[in-house]
Image (cartoon, rainbow, N blue to C red):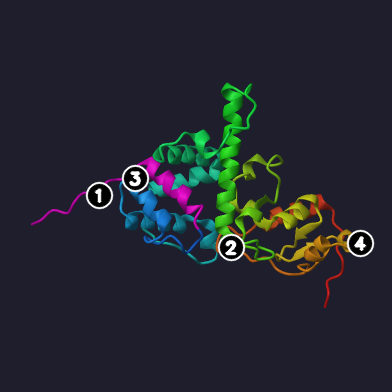
Amino acid sequence: MTSQPTRRPWTREESILALNLYLTLPFGQMDHRNRQVIDLAAQIGRSANAVALKLSNFASLDPDLRSRGISGMSHRSSADAAIWEEFAADREALIYESEQFRAARLGQTIEEIAPTADLPPELEGREREAVVRVRVNQQYFRRMILARYDAHCCITGLAVPQLLTASHIVPWAEAPELRLNPRNGLCLNALHDRAFDTGLLTVSDDFKVQIDSRVQDSDSAAADFLLRFHGSYLKLPDNFEPAVDLLRRHRERSAMRFPALAD
């Protein structure tokens, strides 16, 4: 009787790298033929099928997908669940660790994947490390949010990455525990991002765009472009849709005066 080959257990590093990829791939693109899946497989010495299966395991742990009756494969291990719980408990720490692993696999330093050439030369030691950590995590947040919305503005549909921003619903500085929460992000074009940040634009509990009445007083192309989407609905991602309670916090902070919706 021929014995079956022993499967190599996934290491913690490999699993964290797979979670890193899961969070930056649009749902439905976790196929073994995906170039990013193939690249990660080559980096960790596994088959693309094995990586795709691991991504599906993480999908089965994703509470946002599960709440809507969508799930991946059910062959997840207790180790997968532990990695997911660690991510949920401290997103910043795990994402930074995963980016350190990713940099090493690419033969780079962590500073090379988050350029720091413009940092003041007097920044050294722990202070410099703290700034690098912030930059790495902010860069990752952008990748994660653009992936969720398939690199399209969720209001206008604009699909020019250079003009898109990963907007925090609750600002980065206001709530450290939400900084890398994918449900605390919207993919917006530069104009709508600025309007959202300044409180001229917000989103209702049913994901309807609302523009402050002060914009109506401005006779400009920018105002016309903003008002064109008043009353429209966000184009939501397949998973990690924006959290209603966070949108509510944004509205309360903005203290907006809404114009009447057109019939």
Pointer 4: what residue? Answer: 217
- Find residue 254 and report its horizontal and vertical position in percent: 81, 52
Going from the N terminus, do you reach mark 3 or mark 2 first?
3
Alpha-carbon neighbours of circle 3 within 10 Å: few (<14), some, or many (≥20)?
some
Pointer 2: what residue? Answer: 237
- Find residue 141 and report its horizontal and vertical position in percent: 58, 47
Image-based side of 198 in relation to 14, left or right: right
Pointer 3: what residue? Answer: 44
Going from the N terminus, do you reach mark 4 or mark 3 first?
3
Q: Nearer the viewer, mark 3 or mark 2?
A: 3
**CB under 8 Å between discs 3 and 2:** no
Alpha-carbon neighbours of circle 4 within 10 Å: few (<14), some, or many (≥20)?
few
Q: Secondary structure at mark 4?
A: helix
Tell me where the magenta segment starts and ends, as one range: 1-25
Q: Residue furthest bottom?
A: 263
Q: Amino acid at mark 3?
A: Ile
Q: Amino acid at mark 2?
A: Pro
Image-based side of 218 in relation to 134, left or right: right
**Location of residue 98 with respect to 155 vertically, above or below:** above
Q: Residue at x 60, y 38 (%)?
A: 135
Going from the N terminus, do you reach mark 4 or mark 2 first?
4
- Find residue 24 and report its horizontal and vertical position in percent: 51, 53
Q: Secondary structure at mark 1?
A: loop
Going from the N terminus, do you reach mark 1 or mark 4 first?
1
Going from the N terminus, do you reach mark 3 or mark 1 first?
1
Q: Amino acid at mark 1?
A: Arg
Report, in whole angstroms, how far the alpha carbon at label 1 lies from the one at label 4: 66 Å
Q: Secondary structure at mark 3?
A: helix
Q: Which mark is residue 7?
A: 1
